[in-house]
Image (cartoon, rainbow, N blue to C red):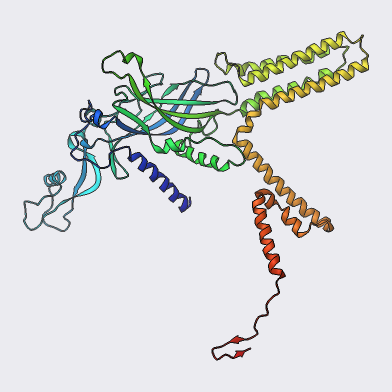
Amino acid sequence: MSPDKNGHMTQSMASYIKTDVSEFSDNFDNSAPPVGLDMAGHDTYLMGPKTVMLDSFVVDLLNVDTSAQTFRLKLLLNMDWEDDGTIEPETKAKRNLGRINTFTSEDSTRATTNGSFRSGKSNDSYSSAYKTGKYVPKREFREDSLASTWNPEVVLVNAIADENPIEAGSKLHCVNMLSGRPVISRSVLYQPECRCEFTFSNFPFDETDLVVKFSSNKWNSEQVNFMWSNRLDKEGSGRRTSNLGGLMPLRRESSYLKKSVDKSAIGGVGLSEFEIIKVRVETEEKDVNSMQRYDNAEGAFSEAHLIMRVRRDPYSYLLRVASIAELLMLLEVLSFLSDNDDLSERFSISGTIFLAMVSLYGPMADALPKVSVVTRVDKWHLYNFFLLFASNVENLMAYMLRGIINKKVMNSAESLLGMLYLYFVITNLIWFIKPLKDREEYTLLLVWLEDRSELYKEKLEWVVGKVLPWRKKPKKEEEEGSPTNKKWGTAVGAVVRMKNGITKKNSNEQPQERPRGVAFSDGQKRE
């Protein structure tokens, strides 16, 4: 990565961190009391709810079960909050290298606690402690931080079971620096199985929001306010663009996904049925009506939602089901061209195709939950079944009317009906695969075709110029019709024409004759 990109990323990250730090108090308060297990040290009436800054990173999308409407993922969650009463500046004693009198363990402890002291062994030599610029928990909170200090008690609201974090055995908090501001940090790794609502109306081109809901089972919204880091709140709010002018937004969003989702993950990134296309976050307050019947109970809890927009990979269904079904539908045209005197031959073709279509539709329907939702593939198959039924009706009518209508007229009518049937089949297929146009693969394919067409056009013009030199375009016409002007539009063409005009103007001017000698200080010229 170039230094410019590194510098841009550093500046961008610094702006996000400054925004996050602005949610906390400005400076470290050494005299602040600890928040306490019951939040006695934090007055919510004067200071408002306790702010907990959240940040997440998706390690892997393990499983998505559309039938049960559940998903399982591995997620890293980081929480930051301030509790100045439980930390203190870290101090270390300077080394007495080369001196006779050195620190004992007792002296080092006093130096760390008091900051500086004079050694009692000698009045001449003394040592002092210095601050490292870091912060550490106070002595009484070092052994078991979780049991002795405040924590937000984060739980997963929409988890199916009691999903505890994988690192639940840890008993310590970390003290990190956030743009010079010391904060208490805790990072946990979850592997939950969550349940959420799926949308199937556009199957197999459907997109679904997988939501992971974080909240507290102890503190309500008047006591704790969950907020997402500005990095997730701002970068993940953009819309996905897939037109020819939107290649740069797609690249920016892809770069953002690399910061939010592990690029080495199998699910959601690699060869999996669902692909993560966008990650965004939301915060809201959830009202619990059963809590409102108690005195002094607000009944609302702060919730933080991590929303992953996933998209199904449709190419497996298109290759294994849709392509075979479409070939069978095209094969049905043969029933219109067969002899109308043999009804069994026609019904054998149509009946075999109908049974094959039913066998293809069954496994796809079993992959969806038993809900009353008519999907896109259902509409496509039902329309194909209707066309097959209409084809069988036409076969029967042609057999019954074979002795009444002239044979030549009947053959012409059947040919016309066959072409009409083929038109409806192709129209139905185009409607079915229309969502592919909204994917970025369609944009990349158009760009690739445009580049290849320009390349072949240039090669063809070169061959024509070599074979037929008298058909070579004039220079002015070549410049106006060059691929550069066509690709970049009229603006670049105007610049080229402007340069040509300036060149032409300069060429019309009479060239000035250069002096043949060189003038020296005495005014004489010498060859």
Q: Where does the image place residue 259, in percent across and percent down from the top left?
A: 45, 39
Is there any visible trace of residue 351 in the rendered image?
Answer: no
Residue under the image location 42 percent in, 45 percent down: 12
Residue under the image location 65 percent in, 53 percent down: 492
Quarter of the rendering containing residue 311: top right
Relative to residue 25, is residue 336 depicted above or below? above
Relative to residue 299, is residue 261 depicted above or below? below
Q: Where does the image place residue 191, in percent across and percent down from the top left?
A: 41, 27
- Closer to the camera, 235 or 497? 497
Residue under the image location 62 percent in, 27 percent down: 316
Relative to residue 327, is residue 234 depicted above or below? below
State the quadrant of the C terminus.
bottom right
Asked whether, in this view, residue 113 is left or right of residue 444, the answer is left
Quarter of the rendering containing residue 326: top right
- Closer to the camera, 331 or 205? 205
Asked whether, in this view, residue 272 is left or right of residue 353, the answer is left
Quarter of the rendering containing residue 176: top left
Q: How many marks?
A: 0
- Closer to the camera, 101 or 151? 151
Relative to residue 492, is residue 318 depicted above or below? above
Q: Where does the image place residue 278, in percent across and percent down from the top left?
A: 50, 33
Asked whether, in this view, residue 174 is left or right of residue 458, the answer is left
Q: Where does the image place residue 228, in percent across and percent down from the top left?
A: 38, 33
Asked whether, in this view, residue 144 is left or right of residue 501, the answer is left
Is there any visible trace of residue 526 in the rendered image?
Answer: yes
